[in-house]
Amino acid sequence: MEGSSTAASPAKRAKRTLRVAAISGSLRRASANTGLIRAAAKLCEESIPGLQIDHVDISDLPLVNTDLENTGGSVFPAAVEVFRDRVRGADCFLFASPEYNYSISGPLKNALDWGSRPPNVWADRAAAVVSASGKSGGKRMVYHVRQVGVFLDIHFVNKPEGFVQAHYPASKFDGDGNLIDQETEEQLRKILLSLQAFALRLIHGKTAAESGQGSLVSLSSATAE
């Protein structure tokens, strides 16, 4: 039927803006990984409608220590509460981090751990992970983050992958950590588009499931009467 809610549904879905909590695993001022987040924000503003980057700074987080919980009338330290609120309010995630000693950087692992403290604020949302590192492109870090994500119920985009050889064979970033390589920028754009599409599918799937459960409950109640 013309003008039906079913026909209007795709247009309504297309207008939704997804908020991406973006976290850099490097605290260095001129970090290339923080530069990837800046580049992602610019790409979203210029060419990816419906996707908005929110860079979540993790430099103020204390090291995970459960002795810091439930003190002074608060469940978590103030900086942790702010961090968890921003993660909780996101529709999906973007992680950008160097590879440290074949694995996840300390700051990023600390942030993941604080977010996992009950109740877990990461769960059941889409994510993408990229790395600007040495010749490996941060592959081991990326796969370790994905492994941690299994326990945290984070759903990672599988393709395309984002392994950036930051300074090989030539530097892809300037002295301030800004991305200057067009090929890497295009790869990042594809990753963001994949994240957007995957996040929307998860959101719509959950909405449909919840709606279906509501219908089943109503039907069950009517039958019981």
Image (cartoon, rainbow, N blue to C red):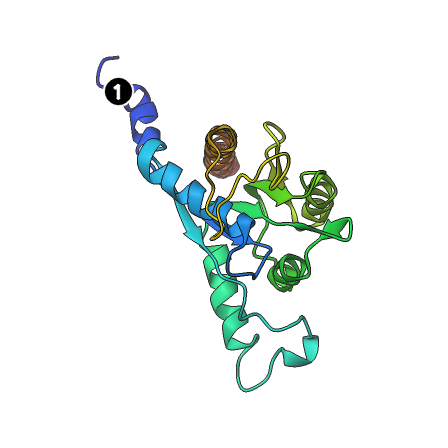
- Please determine whether, in this image, residue 14 is positioned above or below residue 152: above
Q: Given the current orientation, which residue lies at the most extreme top position?
A: 1
At a point 52% along the width and 29% down the height, the residue shown is 187
On the question of residue 219 being in view, the answer is: no
Q: Amino acid at mark 1?
A: Ser
Provide residue 29's location: percent of width, then percent of height.
51, 61
Few, some or many residues within 10 Å of mark 1 (<14, 14–19, 20+): few
Q: Position of residue 213 (x, y in %)?
A: 51, 37
Q: Between 52 and 87, which is closer to the camera in this rendering?
A: 52
Q: Is residue 67 placed above or below 153 in the rendered structure?
A: below
Question: In x, y percent, where is residue 89?
Answer: 44, 54
Q: Residue furthest left?
A: 3
Q: Quadrant of the N terminus?
A: top left
Outermost residue to the right: 102
Rendered image quadrant of residue 111: bottom right
| Residue holding disc 1 | 4
Q: How many marks?
A: 1
Q: Quadrant of residue 75?
A: bottom right
Q: Secondary structure at mark 1?
A: loop
User: Is residue 62 positioned above or below 163 on the image?
Assistant: below
Foreground of the two, 203 or 185:
185
The reply, left or right, for residue 12 in relation to residue 38 is left
Q: Is residue 4 visible?
A: yes
- Expressed as whole percent of the image width and height from the top left, the position of residue 184 reads 52, 32
- Report the side of 14 relative to 199 (left or right): left
Closest to the observer, 14 or 137? 137
